[in-house]
Amino acid sequence: MSTRIRWSVFCTLALTVVVLAAGVVTHAQEQKTQTPKLAKAGDTYSPTPAEVADAKGDGPDGKGNGDDDTLGAWFELGHAAGTYMRLSLNTATMSADQRANGIRDPRAKRGHQGKVRGPIGAWLPNPKDTEGWIFTTDWDGRGEGVWGDTKANCIIMHPYTEKAAAGSVAMTFKVPAGKYTLKAKATDMTVTAGDGVKLRVEVAKGGEKAAAPVAEKAFGDKGDASIEFEAKGITVAEGQLIRLVLDPVAHWGADMTKIENLTLTRVK
């Protein structure tokens, strides 16, 4: 074997070793990223507005708001009360035209926007610093959905309406099986003479209907504008999610709600 061939073989083997080593490092980094939050008793987790608004999520598929992500954003199905579907559109992925004008359905009648109404985030206090999760059909993108406001450092939730019927929106937390406590401050941002809102914690698999609320508290409008909310004894089995629901009660139009200091603590 000539010197040139031997040198070529050596270089090829060396390159293979480097590539394999890089693969091992990358895999180790992925494993670290995928380590579940709240792995043991005493651990706490406080999701940031940036995490809530992240289009990629923290799961391995990099798509966000999926079964592999810690955080989820959902809306209640109008035809099946108590069951939920994931919100499907992250506002950070929308084009400038879509953000300004919404997403029109060419089949919609004149004067009706059809799919998503814009400007996106127009109802929010800091639209330029806020991204979130909305839906792709019959949705008012000006405020309905689950949002992360990085300027005000808060999470914003707003119920939605479908054919004049109000529907809840929700956040979920994918956590290991165990027992948890959830705490948060909630503020009705649009206090009127309406019927207020309810904040509720449930445990269920995916978007399935929960057996019963773990905790629930009404506030806003005729009641206190802000509450300190706490849900204790949240028992989660393998495959279940903790679901934080914002329930509009009846009317949805003045129910924008700010969530601050949201913290999950693993008790057991």
Image: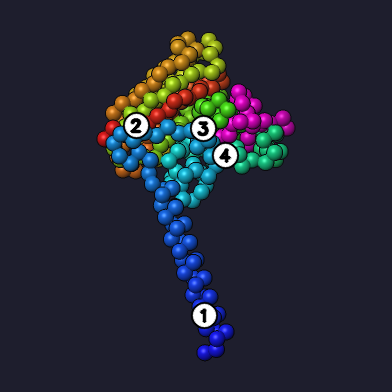
Other residues around mark 1 within 10 Å, as few (<14) / some (14–19) / many (≥20): few
> What residue sits right under mark 1 in the picture?
9
Whole-angstrom CA distance, mark 2 to mark 1, is 56 Å
> What residue sits right under mark 4 in the picture?
90
- Of the numbered discs 2 and 3, the one sitting upstream in the chain is 3
Residue 58 painted magenta: no
Tell me the kind of residue under disc 3: Pro
Tag in front: 4 or 3 = 3
In the image shown, does 14 or 39 lie closer to the viewer? 14
- Of the numbered discs 1 and 4, the one sitting upstream in the chain is 1
Other residues around mark 2 within 10 Å, as few (<14) / some (14–19) / many (≥20): some
Label annotation for residue 49: 3
**Callout 4–callout 3 Cβ contact below 8 Å:** no
**Callout 1–callout 4 Cβ contact below 8 Å:** no
At x 55%, y 42%, the residue is: 55
Residue 112 painted magenta: yes
At x 54%, y 12%, the residue is: 192
Tell me the kind of residue under disc 1: Val
Tell me the kind of residue under disc 4: Asn
- Of the numbered discs 1 and 3, the one sitting upstream in the chain is 1
Is 265 left or right of 74, judged from the image as shown? left
- Of the numbered discs 2 and 1, the one sitting upstream in the chain is 1
- Of the numbered discs 4 and 3, the one sitting upstream in the chain is 3
**Callout 2–callout 3 Cβ contact below 8 Å:** no
Tag in front: 1 or 4 = 1
Of all residues, the one furthest to the right in this rendering is 110
Magenta span covers which residues? 108-133
Other residues around mark 3 within 10 Å, as few (<14) / some (14–19) / many (≥20): many
Tell me the kind of residue under disc 2: Thr
